[in-house]
Amino acid sequence: MSDCGCGDLPASTSLMPVSQAIERLRQAGLAKTPEIETVPLESALNRVLAQDILAPVNVPPRDNSAMDGYALHTDSLGEVPLSLHISQRIPAGANPLPLEPGTAARIFTGAVIPEGANAVVMQENCCVEANNRVIIRQAFRTGENIRRAGQDITVGTPILTQGERLGPAAIGMLASLGIARVPVYRRLRVAILSTGDELVEPGNPLQHSGQIYNSNRYLLQALLKRLDVEIVDLGVIADNLPDTLSALQRAQTLADVVISTGGVSVGEEDHVKTAVEQTGKLDFWKIAIKPGKPLAFGSLGETAFIGLPGNPQSVWITFLILGRQFLLARQGQSQGYAPLEYRMPIAFEVSKPLKREEYFRVRIVNDGTGQTLEKHGNQSSGVLSSSLRADGVARVPAGVTLKPGDFVHFLPFSGFGVA
Ligand SMILES: Nc1nc2c(c(=O)[nH]1)N[C@H]1C(S)=C(S)[C@@H](COP(=O)(O)OP(=O)(O)OC[C@H]3O[C@@H](n4cnc5c(N)ncnc54)[C@H](O)[C@@H]3O)O[C@H]1N2
Ligand code: MOO
């Protein structure tokens, strides 16, 4: 019994390991698939493909020339130098006639090889004569400078898979196959809410010492824009239970996912967790992650709920490490959830074993012998500037101590698509 009259200290609530939270979030994300819509190719960048795509045509569709030069048939032409009549001219886009035997056709890069030709001699190896004839000066071989039909893609080849996010290469490939409209999953609608009586919107003066600018709202908007979701911004909720309850009830009707910031910790000003328990279901709360321990995850009816902690650095890290994986899965993406990781040496030390898996904001520096990771001087969860000049995060598991030169997992911000 302690002597303050409060009784025994409660056993500390156990924290969920980060890996388990990630797995739970991925599974919860995959539990629902968005509806499918068809969009024009110009609007398909970053969308998630809803069906497999097989090549409907060969690419290239016909044998064509890889060079500007002269198309001919290599049989029975004799030894070089050879003088041949130029029987036709074939620019790219033309539909050529069959090649007259024993002649050459003037041909340009990308133009269709005429029936009856089996090689293209590049023009640098030829000499044009005045009488519409060409002299072939260099030896040539069958098939030379011909790009075969289907050499890039043959009809029926699987090209893209359901659940892939469409990047520039995929968009270009779809266009090369003549596909103008693409089946993709509907954009997720994500409602965002900031909690806190202390918050003032940028552009307005701070009125008293207790006020701060609302950075999480804009940080979260920016992070979500990179994931190509529809944002429903529901502004700021005051720190009281009735307002929190009604905001969550409203958000539930407007979105597929609700993300709040702040108010998920244990103080009596923190109402988000209680409100979720009263309006919906809390699946888990408190993760062994630093920054970002009190993250909450649950549902409000059919709508998923993610409560990010209020400290801006906790928003940044928990969104990237945890929330992002849920959103990718719920968007219909079938793989590629895990961020890129590299093994890199550190230039700092971790002298005491960490209680939670920690994500240090780090920069890549060259110490003269090679690249190493330097830690930002202030790793407080309230300090957003530690991300501003960082290249990514160094992930250090709980229970570990490290010395300079030891290797860690480095997760570059570019690997999350947010650099
Ligand atoms: N007794 C305990 N206190 C705290 C614990 C704990 O375990 N026991 N956990 C700490 C940890 S870890 C975190 S992280 C924070 C998270 O708390 P909340 O999610 O309830 O966040 P708030 O208290 O609402 O805010 C925390 C901090 O962040 C500032 N904030 C909030 N919203 C914004 C915003 N939109 N823009 C800018 N800054 C914002 C807020 O002013 C606070 O300074 O709890 C610890 N406490
Ligand atoms: O987990 Mo909190 O973000 O350290 O302060």
Image (cartoon, rainbow, N blue to C red):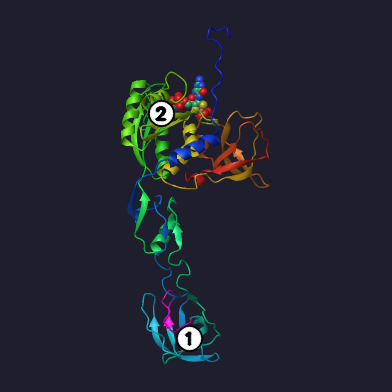
Please provide the residue range marked out in magenta. 106-119
Is residue 93 covered in magenta? no
Seen from the viewer's position, the closer of residues 285 and 109 is 285
Q: How far from the left and from the top, in percent, is residue 135?
A: 49, 89
Residue contact between numbered discs 1 and 2, judged by CB atoms under 8 Å: no
User: Residue 346 appears in which quarter of the rendering?
Assistant: top right
Residue at 42 percent of width and 82 percent of height: 115
Q: Which mark is residue 281?
A: 2
Residue at 41 percent of width and 77 percent of height: 112
Q: Residues within 10 Å of mark 2 (few under 14, many from 20)?
A: some
Q: How far from the left and from the top, in percent, is residue 392?
A: 54, 41
Q: Indicate the secondary structure of the residue bearing disc 2.
A: strand
Q: Residues within 10 Å of mark 1 (few under 14, many from 20)?
A: many
Q: Is residue 97 left or right of residue 117?
A: left
In the image, residue 301 above or below residue 30: above
Report the quarter where the N terminus lies.
top right
Q: Is residue 93 in view?
A: yes
Mark 1 Cβ inside 8 Å of ligand 2:
no
Q: How far from the left and from the top, in percent, is residue 78?
A: 53, 92
Q: Amino acid at mark 2?
A: Lys
